[in-house]
Amino acid sequence: MMLGLLLARVGVEVIVLEKHKDFLRDFRGDTIHPSTLELMHELGLLEEFLSRPHQQLRQIQAHFGSEKTTIADFSHLPTHCKFIAFMPQWDFLNFISEHAHRYASFSLRMEAAVNDLLFENERVIGVRAATPQGILEVRTDLVVGADGRSSTVRELAGLEVVDLGAPIDVLWFGLSKRDGDPEQSFGYVGAGQFMVLLARGAYWQCGYVIRKGGFDETRERGLEKLRAHISRCVPFLNNRVEELKDWESVKLLTVKVDRLRQWCREGLLCIGDSAHAMSPVGGVGINLAIQDAVATANILGQALREGRVELNDVRAVQHRREWPAHLTQRVQIFMHEHFLERIFQATEPMAPPLPAQLLEKFAVLRRIPARMIGIGFRPEHVMPAK
Ligand SMILES: Cc1cc2nc3c(=O)[nH]c(=O)nc-3n(C[C@H](O)[C@H](O)[C@H](O)COP(=O)(O)OP(=O)(O)OC[C@H]3O[C@@H](n4cnc5c(N)ncnc54)[C@H](O)[C@@H]3O)c2cc1C
């Protein structure tokens, strides 16, 4: 959607195909990072964006049992917004879509599920998508697969996926927010447990981390046990865990960390999770996908407008965005192996590990994770429209 907006803005004809009929799904996180907010500023949309309902998180805190530590502090970032904005992703996508529709060259087709690629010799020249009205064929100079961690496009294109392994899955559910709750929360570490709470207006969006493949076992142990685990990890939720009435209210989100060896072939490019599926650790995947979109528009905008996109142009996108994505994945994998694994093995509530203690003690150090999470490696900037 972001790439659609950016390309339409520089006069490229673009059609975005989305397989669902709306953006009302809750499994993709809600974080809009300072670097993305900076892009909103560069696009002249920041003020309007901030007038939409959202919450602002200026520091990230983790609770280790009864101890609270501050992990990141965004107040020193060199950006207009020194906070992460929390906005449900459907509101964010609707916002981007509204602005993209101001350009005559933009169109969005909902309920269009891409299920085939069109080839001419070895070059991809378009897609075929299933819609309620029948098959839709779109012929184009460039197909961009931005279809997430279970990308159909990358599979149809035969691009080789390197699986980096993710030892976790996430149980995703909502619990009501009540008077006296903390304003904004983040990570809670219990004995062998890790849970994240995202404030979404009237309710908490909860992510309860389990070992990969552990969902069947969790179900076998029963809902009562899960409720007890949640109460133990985040005690203030104790008086509402009964809201989890059945397993329908608990969704399993499968976490993947992988990357494509080649993000492109002639006529086709993958970006975002489709090129490099991100773990939820650090909540940076949305941001990274958006940074890919900006780089793609910057590198390919003119060539697309002139209808002459060569494989080398498309490769330049991978060349620019590959290392920030890989480095971020490395950090996530390090956190899986050294932080989450320790949590899973703990039988007693864990004391803050040394890095967390140092961050608590020396406020200046909190600028490092703030920069990595809030801006990331190699931030992109929107080029002025000619
Ligand atoms: C449990 C969990 C929590 C997370 N929390 C956060 C967080 O808080 N913050 C954060 O930054 N990141 C988070 N992430 C990572 C983040 O969700 C992804 O990195 C990010 O959404 C990638 O964006 P994307 O646009 O590449 O793909 P997606 O956001 O997955 O979007 C892909 C889109 O393509 C559509 N689509 C798929 N297939 C087709 C098809 N065949 N035809 C047409 N359309 C199709 C989908 O419906 C979807 O709208 C989380 C990940 C997980 C697993």
Image (cartoon, rainbow, N blue to C red):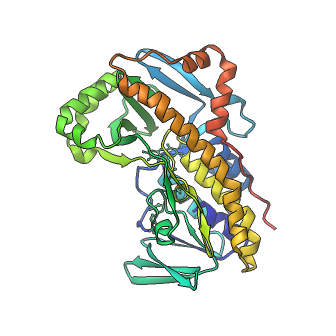
Can you give x and y, in whole percent of width and height, for residue 45 in the image?
68, 54
Q: Would you place residue 21 above or below residue 379 in this image?
A: below
- Work out whether residue 185 can be spotted: no
Front residue of 186/141: it is: 141
Residue at x 41% of width, y 83% of height: 135
Side of 275 relative to 381 (left or right) = left
Front residue of 83/323: it is: 323
Q: Would you place residue 117 above or below residue 7 in this image?
A: below
Q: Would you place residue 29 above or below residue 22 in this image?
A: above
Residue at x 47% of width, y 56% of height: 149
Front residue of 367/163: it is: 163
Can you give x and y, in whole percent of width and height, for residue 242 in the image?
22, 33
Residue at x 67% of width, y 44% of height: 35
Residue placed furthest toward the bottom: 120
- Work out whether residue 93 can be spotted: yes
Quarter location, residue 24: bottom left
Residue placed furthest toward the right: 386
Can you give x and y, in whole percent of width and height, for residue 354 in the image?
55, 17
Side of 193 relative to 94 (left or right) = left
Q: Would you place residue 37 above or below residue 176 in this image?
A: below
In the picture, which quadrant includes the C terminus? bottom right
Side of 219 relative to 302 (left or right) = left
In the picture, which quadrant includes the N terminus? bottom right
Residue at x 43% of width, y 43% of height: 166
Side of 207 relative to 289 (left or right) = left
Front residue of 168/91: it is: 168
Quarter location, residue 152: bottom left
Can you give x and y, in whole percent of width and height, for residue 290 in the image?
61, 54
How many numbered marks are there? 0
